[in-house]
Amino acid sequence: MSEDLFLKIIDRQIPADIVFETEDVLAFRDINPQAPVHVLIIPKVHIRTINDIEQEHEALVGKLFTAAREIAAQEGVAEDGYRVVMNCNEGAGQSVFHIHLHLLGGRGLTWPPG
Ligand code: DGP
């Protein structure tokens, strides 16, 4: 059993509402949604925080964004607008230490975020 919660979702050890999957990327609905559309997009390999992203991960991190584009279209928010955000470390609100893009949409989003 992995101690990484999101690796457990990848391994189907714990359930999630999966909306998108490729060889390298998985996306599922956030358990505590902050918008009508709130999807988490993760790499299938463990990268703890943005600070741990290495040059070798550049293509993989790019795939998180192409997944975001596809999921936004699939969820019907691409034209109205949506936000992707990745928190880094506790001070920015990161609570799960496996990098993930939040994709938020389906309502008006203000700026700056809190
Ligand atoms: P962050 O705070 O940026 O690390 O975001 C972590 C998100 O993960 C948070 O919005 C809640 C979500 N989350 C935590 N545990 C689970 C889980 O077991 N399942 C799902 N689907 N989402 C989870």
Image (spheres, rainbow, N blue to C red):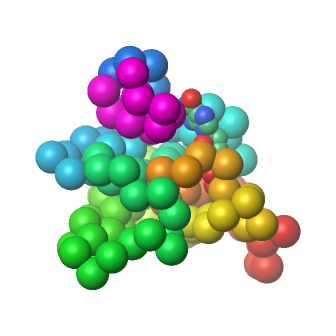
Residue at coordinates 25% horizontally, 66% vertically from top-left? 60
Q: Is residue 33 above or below residue 47?
A: above
Please tell me whether residue 5 belongs to the stretch shown in magenta. Answer: yes
22 and 106: which one is in front?
22
Residue at coordinates 51% horizontally, 63% vertically from top-left? 49
92 and 62: which one is in front?
92
Numbered circles on residues, count: 0
Quarter of the rendering occupied by the N terminus: top left
Residue 82 place in picture, x, y as percent:
55, 65
Residue 72 place in picture, x, y as percent:
42, 57
Residue 93 in view (yes/no):
yes
Please tell me whether residue 37 belongs to the stretch shown in magenta. Answer: no
Residue at coordinates 50% horizontally, 46% vertically from top-left? 39
What range is drawn magenta here? 1-11
Q: Is residue 18 left or right of residue 30?
A: left
Q: Is residue 2 above or below residue 46?
A: above
Q: Is residue 5 left or right of residue 25?
A: right
Residue 66 in view (yes/no):
no
Residue 58 place in picture, x, y as percent:
27, 77
Residue at coordinates 19% horizontally, 46% vertically from top-left? 22
Residue 91 place in picture, x, y as percent:
77, 66
